[in-house]
Image (tube, helix red, strand yellow):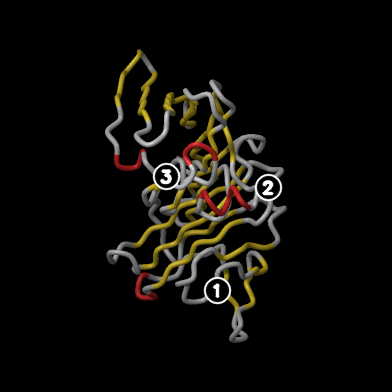
Amino acid sequence: MFPSIDGSFYPDGIWAGTPIPDHGEVWGLPWKCDVHCQEIQFSVHGVRFPYQIIKKITLNGWILNLNYQFINHSDYTFHFIWALHALLNGDAEDTIIHFPQEVKNIINVDNQSSYLGQWGEIYDYPIAHLANGSELDLSRLEPKKAKNHEKYYVPHPLTNGSCSIEYQKSRERLIYHFPVDKVPYLGIWKNHGWLKNDYNFALEPCTGLYDDLYLAHKMKKSAFIPPRSSYEFTFKMEIHSPY
C-alpha cells in the first residue's frame, strides 16, 4: 500500500489536499512486469503524484527477496506511507504471531474493533487487559465465528526488524526481515470473518504509523523521499520447514 493505507489527503506543499484513495494509489493500478533470468521486476507510476515504484523479486533457497525502490521525479519532497499487506491463512488453534521481544504494548487504530475500544487506546502485548476486565491474547487469532477484526501498531520504531508466524501443527514458520532504518514500524490486521466473511490476517511492516498519511505526517511518523531522489530497501520472506 502506497502512499497511504487509509483514504487520505496529501498533507502539505504543492499537492496539499490532493485525495488519496483507500489502500493507496498503486493497489488498483496495472503494473508492468518483466522477467530477467532469475529476477522478476514490477514497476508502476503514480497518477496523482510524480513517483515511480520498482519492485524486484528473487528467490534464494527458502528466502524470497523483495527489493523496493520508490523514486521521486519531482523537485519537491514527497511524503508517504508504505505498508506490506500480504494476507495470510491462519487458524485460531494453530497459529501463533511472534513480534520482536522488545514489543511490550500496542496502539489500537480501529474505532470499530470489538475488543480494543477507541482509536488510540494503548494495551499491553501480548496479553491485553480489556476494559471489561477480561484478557485477550493478541499473539493468537480468534475463530471465524467471532465476526470481528482488529488493526493495531507497535507505537514506537523498532530496533529489531523481524516478526514471524508459527504454524504449530506443521512446525513451519514464516519470518519477515526488514531494515528498521527504512521500515521502522510494525502493524497487524486481523479479519475474523467480519469483512466479506473472509478469514485472514496480515503482518504489516511499514514506513509510518496510524494508516492515514495526513495524520502520520502531522505526528511526524511518515517517511519521505527527497527531491529527485529515491528510497530503497530490501524486504525478505523466509520459510523454516522441518520437511
Numbered disc 3: secondary structure: loop
**Which one is nearer the viewer's eye here, 32 or 159?**
32
Q: Residue at x 30, y 30 (%)?
A: 31
Which quadrant holds the C terminus? top left
Amino acid type indicated by mark 2? Pro
Q: Residue at x 67, y 35 (%)?
A: 181
Numbered disc 2: secondary structure: loop
Q: Residue at x 46, y 41 (%)?
A: 3
Q: Quadrant of residue 134?
A: bottom right
Q: Mark 1 vs mark 2: give the one in front.
A: 1
Compute the Cα span from label 3 to label 2: 28 Å
Question: Looking at the image, is mark 3 or mark 1 earlier in the sequence?
Answer: 3
Which quadrant holds the N terminus? top left
Q: Are marks 3 and 2 in contact (CB under 8 Å)?
A: no
Q: Is residue 187 left or right of residue 90?
A: right
Mark 2 neighbour density, 10 Å: few (under 14) some (14–19) many (20 or more): some
Expressed as whole percent of the image width and height from the top left, the position of residue 17 reads 45, 47
Residue indicated by mark 2: 157
Amino acid type indicated by mark 1? Gln
**Which one is nearer the viewer's eye here, 140 or 229?**
229
Q: Is residue 162 left or right of residue 101?
A: left
Compute the Cα span from label 1 to label 2: 22 Å
Residue indicated by mark 1: 118
